[in-house]
Amino acid sequence: AEDRRRVDVIITQKGIQLLSSIEKRFEEQLQKIYTAIHKKGGVKNLDKVHQRIGRAKEKYPSVGQYYTIEVTADKKQTRQQK
């Protein structure tokens, strides 16, 4: 019975480490989106930004569900598509 408890703890610790690496990759994706918005020539179209966020959430669903992401458009810099 003691050996079984040790195995469960090790698996749990590995699960926590795996989750944090996935969480780190998800946050890196969000950081890339943020950088692109604030960089010259980056994607600033609101629909495209929402698409990129949606793709990141689809790629990392185990972590993405715990994040609430708000996108607000700056009225001065919003460009309308023709």
Image (cartoon, rainbow, N blue to C red):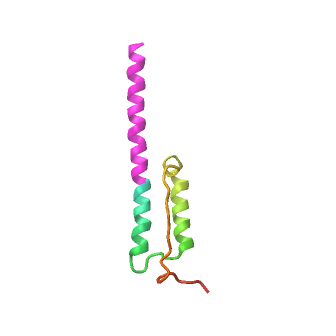
Q: Quadrant of the C terminus?
A: bottom right
Q: Main secondary structure of the magenta part?
A: helix
Q: Position of residue 45 (x, y in %)?
A: 53, 76
Could you say where residue 33 lies in the image, as x and y percent from the top left? 44, 66
Classify 62 as above or below 7.
below
Magenta residues, start to end: 1-25
> How far across and down, in percent of the image, does residue 50 sit?
54, 67
Q: Residue 77 at what x, y percent from top left?
A: 47, 82
| Residue 6 is covered by the magenta coloring | yes
**Lateral position of residue 64 relative to residue 24, left or right:** right
Quarter placement of the N terminus: top left
From this view, report whether residue 44 is shown above or below residue 52.
below
Q: Residue at x 39, y 80 (%)?
A: 40
Q: Quadrant of residue 17?
A: top left
**Residue 7 lies in quadrant:** top left
Q: Residue furthest bottom?
A: 82
Look at the image and say whether residue 17 sits in the magenta stretch. Answer: yes
Residue sitting at 43 percent across and 43 percent down?
19
Relative to 55, residue 61 above or below:
above
The residue at the point 54 percent across, 71 percent down is: 48
Residue farthest to the top, as pictured: 1
Left or right of 3? Residue 54 is right
